[in-house]
Amino acid sequence: MATATIDSPDTHAADGHDEHHTSTGISNTKLAMWAFLGSECLLFGGLISTYLLYKTRRGPGPDNTTIPTDIFDIPFTSVSSFVLLMSSLTMVLALSALTRGDNQATRAWLLSTAMLGGVFIGGQVYEFTSFLREGVGFTHNPASSAFFTLTGFHGVHVSLGIVMLMSLFVASKQGKLTPKNTETVEIVGLYWHFVDVVWIFIFTVIYLIPVE
Amino acid sequence: MSETLTEPHVDHDDAHEHPSDWAYIKIALILAVFTGIEVLTYFESALPIFENTSVTIATLMFLMVVKFYLVATWFMHLRFDNKIFSQLFVGGLILATGVYVIALAAFEFWA
Amino acid sequence: MAITEEPLALTSGEAATVERPLGALTRPKGGNGWRDWLSTVDHKKIGIMYGVAAMFFFVVGGIEALLIRLQLAAPDGQILSAEVYNQVFTMHGVTMVFLFIMPLAAAFANYLIPLQIGARDVAFPRLNALSFWIWISGAVFLNTSWIVGGGGADCGWFCYSPNSGLAFSPSHGVDFYVIGLQIAGVASLISAANLIVTVLNMRAPGMTLFRMPVLTWMLLVTQFLLLFALPVITVALFLLMFDRLFDAQFFNPETGGDPLLWQHLFWIFGHPEVYIIILPSFGIISEIIPTFSRKPIFGYSFMVFSGIAIGFMGWGVWAHHMFVSGIGPFSVAAFSLSTMFIAVPTGVKILNWLATMWGGKLRFTTAMLFAVGTVAMFTIGGLSGVTHSLAPADSQQTDTYYIVAHFHYVIFGGGVLGLMGGLYFWWPKIFGHCLNEFWGKVHFWVILVGFNLTFGPMHVVGLQGMSRRIDTYAAGYGFEFWNLVATIGSFIIALGVLIFFFNVWKSRRDAADLPAPGPDPWDARSLEWMLPSPTPEHNFDTIPVVESEDEWWHRKYGYDENKRVVRIATIEEAAQDGSATGVHLPAPSFWPLVLALGLPLIGYGLIFNLWLAVVGGALTGLAIYSWALEPVDDPDADHGHGHDDHHDDDDDGGDDHAADDSEPVTAGAEGGE
Ligand code: HEM
Ligand SMILES: [Cu+2]
């Protein structure tokens, strides 16, 4: 618990410039977001561990013995992973543009972030359908159930992020996104980057590390 | 990557200056290069050293941790922000790692 | 979560021109009619609703318990069939844990945390309302499986696989369990984040973390446990749901699934969960015991740190529930050791309570009786817990009534008794009149006797080898006598609960003829007692500036030259009179309720017909959208800022913006709502 860093409220009340009026001087919403992300670590940790435990468990056969690792398309996934990674860059650039008050650029970066996310999701849809074609379905064996559940959860997170980004985009169009709202964009950004780091983990541990 | 934070922030998260766009772009470039190396490990012929699985795994884990760290500290601003954010997040990470590594150990996953 | 709800439409100053969202529900105003309860965002009303709903489910779970005991009163019981018996004990456990103790603790957390830290409300008042409504829709959803699901869940409260699979549990009971707990889990997660932010960010000036009352501390630790433990069971519940509803292969051993995975996930959540259950009660008695011993708590920092230590160590012992599940000798040894260690901080707490009472001027009010009862009963439960931390011993005890005895001593003896004490203690603060002390004491003694008669004998039959979760037993094994005693005991507990309800009714009726309790009937120590009873809607007239631990006590008492305690102010002098008017409070909203109603629809939809899930999803989406567009403050309400006489950085409890209109309000700052 973070006791040491919390400055005491009385010293705090003394410095008049603080704009948040909270005991710690940090904003409620941002603190809540970080708490939520801390909690999400245990959610994804559970899903990832489940997959790791099951990744080589094939069904008893005859037609459910293929597991995702047999048919991973690493070059393809590398591209879509790279796309998601770069969307983190466009996200920070959106925030930075908003801080400068450059609405045009903010919108452009928000839109490109959402679009990169969309490309990633598109890739995932393609991956899922090609898996199905190759006989790896959700219900086939523990490995495939775990794979679809993990990547599906992640995909839902990305999709929600896209919805938020588009809401920000629309708000900006309506002139409602001003430098005063940087924190809102920052918080959406936090969520977005989190989803990205989860994928950094998944890409390495699930896709790249070779299975004996 | 040090042109940003010259005066260390004290208490308040708004006290800091944000890094320049150029700094972000440099971070992204590093991330891109690292990802490139990661993908290279898949093509064993690219570098003979990756025929050794342990080396591959060690490299991959190292690169992953660095990427994770860079995104969290720069893009998520943890290095400039109030420590309490890092504590919450790292708390969740450590806890998750701890319990799940132990749980997998109980399945003799690491053996 | 929070993000999609951003009131983006709201930039500063614009609030006054924002239209009524969708016009479907007009914005409620404050008051006390039923509409105001449905739309309230006041942490006190929300706390009361949690409490009332929890007591309702206490009765439901209690009736289930009585059915179990009736069935087991004599050998070869015929009251319930084996199937129904399974459903009844499962739903009893689930109801008591998730629908009674946790929400009752949430009631105290909601009502008391803002008061104890000197705040006007929680950090996110509307999210707070959302948590309550989501929780109750999950709770009701779970219980409707009796009606539409073909019976309750029948897999035990920890719902081990493969019993929980379609093969062994083909009715919809387990589906309701899985989805109901997910819904209730969302509620607790939101509430945990909300209360963590509240404690860290909303403290009055001078209220440093180490001046906070022990109760607030223990509730804070509880919220952290919830924050990190709930996602783990969420994963488990999703996997099971996918298995049952969508033919996934997580727990089916025939196709390579591993039932042990469920056990691990469940207990990684499950052991922290037992501390989620017990710590609020520990906090409550840490307020009651000093008050009625007229001494500060002994070893405040030990108290706090042992609570934190329990919070940490609680993560490292889960597999002690699995000693006979085949987890291997190394795991057994490691978890056996860690379990023994966790008894240490628990022991520290017990010693501190005893030391607080030692040499104090004890007053045995009902609340104090319950608190002392809690310490005593919990000690017994803790000791039996240590006996099964030894794996060889536990191999004999596990799945017998000895375990049932253990966890009832800790949960009922340590948890429920403490919460009951809390009700007696804070009742005057909440409702403006005390509960009758005579009937309160009758309540206590009846419960205490009934409790020990019910669960004490279970140690005996357990060690004799009677296994838990069997619907009947044959005569001749020596189980008859103690089972009958336990059944009689359970009806004595039921009588005790009835006496409590009678007391509630009688005390309310008599209240008019009795003198009002005043702000501080017990001569207590923390900030809530400086407010009039019942607490005014705006809590504090002016936010107090805190100078020490036990702030309220130190406003009443000082020391003379000989270091003897002397009174320096009467309660009336030191207390606030609640007369502030026009304090700016967050406006009520119907959207939390509407949003919450969508979730059970999604649940029914997943089970019966996916179209219904679409409808539920649409309703939830609509509510989120409307919520986001609804300004945090009602543009039409007259706030009367002019009367705001309080300190400038403590306004309006919740949404962190200034009451001062000249200062621009940023939508972002109101964000997560
Ligand atoms: C001194 C501290 C404690 C120790 C050493 C301890 C130890 C244990 C052990 C080893 C078990 C597993 C027994 C078995 O299933 O074979 C167990 C079961 C249980 N304990 Fe505790 N315990 C302690 C405190 C608590 C507390 C504080 C609570 C709740 C508030 C609690 C609630 C439970 C429950 C509900 C079960 C039974 C779960 C089930 O199998 O249905 N325990 N305890
Ligand atoms: Cu346990």
Image (cartoon, rainbow, N blue to C red):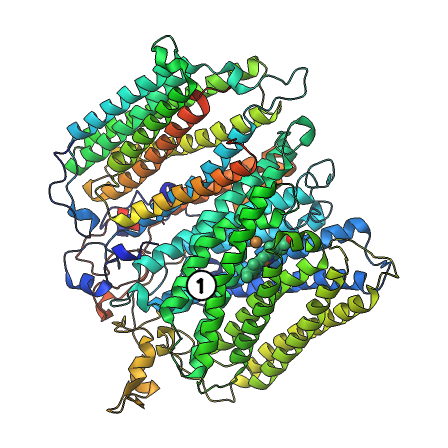
Assign a secondary structure to mark 1: helix
User: Residue C253 appears at what percent x and percent y?
Assistant: 68, 31
Task: In the rendered view, tell whether residue A160 sits above or below residue C178.
Answer: above
- Displayed quadrant of residue A185: top left
Picture quarter with ligand 2: bottom right
Q: Mark 1 points at which residue?
A: C109
Dot 1 beta carbon under 8 Å from ligand 1:
no
- Displayed quadrant of residue C552: bottom left
User: Residue B69 appears at what percent x and percent y?
Assistant: 30, 34
- Left/right placement of residue C437 relative to residue C515 reads right
Q: Residues within 10 Å of mark 1 (few under 14, many from 20)?
A: many
- Left/right placement of residue C137 relative to residue C130 reads right
User: Residue C144 appears at what percent x and percent y?
Assistant: 66, 50
- Left/right placement of residue A40 relative to residue C454 reads left
User: Residue A158 appears at what percent x and percent y?
Assistant: 40, 30
Q: Residue at x 28, y 86 (%)?
A: C558
Quadrant of the image containing the N terminus of chain A: bottom left
Please state which amino acid type lies under the numbered disc 1: Ala
Q: Which residue is more in the foreground, C388 or C163?
A: C388
Residue under mark 1: which chain is it in?
C
Q: Residue at x 33, y 53 (%)?
A: C632
Task: In the rendered view, tell whether residue B27 sits above or below residue C21.
Answer: above
Q: Residue at x 26, y 90 (%)?
A: C560
Task: In the rendered view, tell whether residue C34 sits above or below residue B15.
Answer: below
Q: Residue at x 51, y 86 (%)?
A: C512
